[in-house]
């Protein structure tokens, strides 16, 4: 079977359904480009780069444990899938995540059992919906929240530095989704909606408190009624929580609010402590949606901050949870957490985990204090068996042959494209990338297709044709515009030069390795990660893998070094170098 697929051992199975929707490819084609019919460059364009396939293999120790019948693996979405929000609708579950300045943005996942997830679309899937030019990678769309009511899906979100809070709607979660309905009276971040059973609808959000801000991270959770048909908040706004559950301790970053109504109680659940090692989830309740809200005596209901940081295979940063009820009456929580190495490094970003919710004395708990988040645990009673979750999690090999007419939904670009820079028509069976002058350090849109790094130990490889003079092409590992690698090739006289560029902060990019090779017919490039050690290799004309640089310090791609909120990504990249010569 060709096309994008997942391979485990010798058995090949289809990857995520919906891979051929091709949102990004369709949109890029709509942008227009000055190309000849066969994809060759015109007088003012660089020669295209041709890629034959891309392959990704993950082999994490945490995923090697046998999976008992009826169990599943955490995380349920490995790699950079942060800030999950979930809703049950039409007999299925739908989940969305933050993507910051990546495009298409806010992926929509679908599941029948909370364990097996398929991406079906994106909320931000047209260039005119939002523009991220000039923004650093970790700005853009923050934590979304999804709800469903009377046949319509609602996603409410914050476009940081690019418009503010908004609502998008769709009758089909796969799309199309509406343009943003802006909410100029709602400030801060992390809005969510609550549909009460009396027909009233409310919007919650994190913002500065009514009183003067007393310390860095002092925030409040606000509530206001909203006319959902007109997308207009109205009436008084009220602070439900000022600071956190113990304001006398100056808690930081109360955020990610959700309200649930259960047995006549309104439960307000929030993240607290920031999105790092002190992250947690807390819950309060009231008989009235407006409060006052009483904090649970045994908060937090989820955290990993009380565990030994030196423990093996640690899961950290747990919080930002959303709860959902299954068809059997059971409750479950999806939340973000990170898998670390070297105590505080993680290159895979904030991932999505799943745990059951236990109710006791009218209060929900996700995980008792002092307990580690399990990598393997029993699944819901309605879980499909066996629990084969690749390519969303576990150890697997995923390969894209680029022989379909559209790009798979697992691919993204950095910021919103302004012109068409790739296609599948110029050479059927190959990916053609038309180079842009923008490098990976741009605050615009480079000609780079990104796939999430999902493992601490992985190999990412691709095959390409040696590009014509003036074009550099190859494989990139990208965390942000200031932290990345580019393993590339360019023409050099009668032969070619392999090179490895690296940027690790404010300093300009540097070439850290080069190798002259003969003009190969086909060239394969590979980036391998082993926690914080990254190695780079090539294979020219099938001569076997040769090292270019081994064991380089790949902690530059970790969130604690690079900052921000995203994880590392990998994929093909091409650059127009004519102005550099």
Image (cartoon, rainbow, N blue to C red):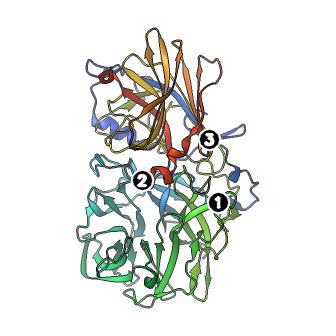
Dot 3 or dot 2: first in sequence order is 2
Quarter of the view holding residue 359: bottom right
Q: Would you name the residue on which mark 3 appears?
A: 458
> Front-most of 306 and 566?
306
Can see residue 114?
no
Image quarter in which the C terminus is found: top left
Mark 3–mark 2 CB contact (< 8 Å):
no
SS under mark 2: loop
> Front-most of 4 and 98?
98
Residue 317: image x %, image y %? 54, 64
Dot 3 or dot 1: first in sequence order is 1
The numbered disc on residue 370 is: none
Residue 322: image x %, image y %? 50, 70
Q: Would you name the residue on which mark 1 appears?
A: 314
Mark 3–mark 1 CB contact (< 8 Å):
no
> Front-most of 188 and 493?
493
Quarter of the view holding residue 564: bottom left
The numbered disc on residue 99 is: 2
SS under mark 1: loop
Can see residue 462?
yes
Mark nearest the camera among 3 and 1 is 1
SS under mark 3: strand
Query: Mark 2: few, some, or many residues within 10 Å (few <14, many ≥20)?
Result: many
For the residues marked 3 and 1, what is the alpha-carbon distance in whole angstroms?
Answer: 18 Å
For the residues marked 3 and 2, what is the alpha-carbon distance in whole angstroms?
Answer: 22 Å
Image side of residue 43 versus residue 148, left or right: left
Mark nearest the camera among 3 and 2 is 3
Residue 405: image x %, image y %? 45, 33
Q: Is residue 378 above or below residue 63?
A: below
């Amino acid at each position: 079977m060709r096309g994008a697929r997942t391979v485990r051992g010798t058995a090949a199975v289809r990857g995520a359904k919906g891979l051929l929707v091709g949102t990004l490819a369709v949109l890029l084609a709509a942008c227009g480009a000055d190309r000849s019919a066969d994809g060759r460059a015109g007088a003012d364009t660089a020669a295209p780069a041709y890629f034959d396939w891309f392959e990704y293999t993950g082999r994490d120790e945490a995923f090697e444990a046998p999976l008992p019948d009826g169990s599943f693996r955490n995380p349920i979405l490995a790699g950079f899938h942060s800030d999950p929000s979930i809703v049950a609708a039409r007999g299925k579950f739908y989940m969305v995540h933050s993507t910051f300045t990546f495009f298409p943005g806010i992926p929509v996942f679908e599941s029948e059992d909370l364990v097996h997830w398929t991406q079906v679309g994106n909320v931000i899937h047209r260039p005119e919906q939002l523009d991220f030019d000039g923004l650093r990678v970790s700005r853009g769309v923050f934590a979304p929240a999804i709800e469903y009511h009377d046949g319509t899906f609602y996603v409410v979100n914050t476009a940081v530095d690019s418009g503010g809070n908004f609502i998008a709607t769709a009758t089909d979660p796969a799309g199309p989704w509406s343009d943003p309905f802006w909410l100029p009276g709602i400030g801060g971040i992390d809005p969510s909606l609550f549909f009460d059973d009396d027909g009233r609808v409310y919007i919650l959000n994190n913002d500065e408190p009514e009183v003067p801000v007393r310390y860095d991270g002092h925030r409040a959770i606000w509530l206001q009624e909203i006319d959902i048909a007109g997308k207009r908040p109205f009436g008084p706004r009220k602070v439900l929580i000022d600071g956190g559950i113990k304001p006398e301790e100056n808690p930081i970053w109360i955020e990610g609010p959700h309200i649930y109504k259960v047995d006549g109680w309104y439960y307000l659940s929030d993240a607290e402590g920031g999105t790092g090692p002190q992250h947690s989830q807390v819950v309060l309740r009231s008989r009235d949606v407006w409060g006052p809200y009483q904090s649970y005596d045994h908060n937090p209901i989820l955290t990993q901050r009380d565990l030994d940081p030196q423990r093996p295979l640690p899961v950290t940063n747990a919080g930002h949870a959303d709860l959902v009820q299954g068809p059997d009456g059971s409750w479950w929580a999806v939340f973000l957490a990170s898998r670390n190495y070297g105590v505080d490094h993680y290159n895979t970003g904030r991932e999505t985990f799943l745990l059951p919710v236990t109710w006791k004395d009218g209060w929900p708990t996700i995980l008792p204090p002092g307990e580690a988040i399990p990598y393997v645990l029993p699944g819901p009673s309605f879980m499909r068996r066996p629990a084969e979750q690749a390519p969303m999690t576990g150890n697997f090999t995923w390969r894209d042959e680029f022989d379909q007419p559209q790009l798979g939904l697992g691919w993204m670009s950095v910021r919103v494209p302004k012109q068409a820079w790739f296609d599948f028509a110029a050479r059927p069976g190959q990916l053609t990338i038309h180079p842009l002058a923008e490098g990976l350090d741009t605050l615009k849109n480079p000609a780079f297709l990104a796939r999430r790094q999902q493992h601490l130990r992985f190999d990412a490889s691709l095959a390409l044709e040696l590009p014509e003079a003036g074009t550099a092409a190859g494989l990139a590992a990208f965390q942000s515009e200031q932290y990345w690698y580019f393993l590339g090739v360019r023409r050099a006289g009668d032969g070619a030069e392999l090179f490895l560029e690296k940027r690790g902060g404010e300093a300009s990019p540097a070439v850290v390795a080069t190798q002259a090779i003969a003009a190969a017919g086909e060239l394969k490039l590979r980036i391998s990660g082993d926690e914080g050690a990254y190695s780079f290799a090539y294979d020219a004309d099938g001569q076997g893998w040769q090292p270019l640089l081994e064991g380089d310090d790949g902690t530059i791609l970790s969130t604690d070094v690079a900052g921000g909120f995203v994880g590392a990504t990998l994929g093909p990249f091409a650059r127009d170098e004519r102005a550099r010569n």
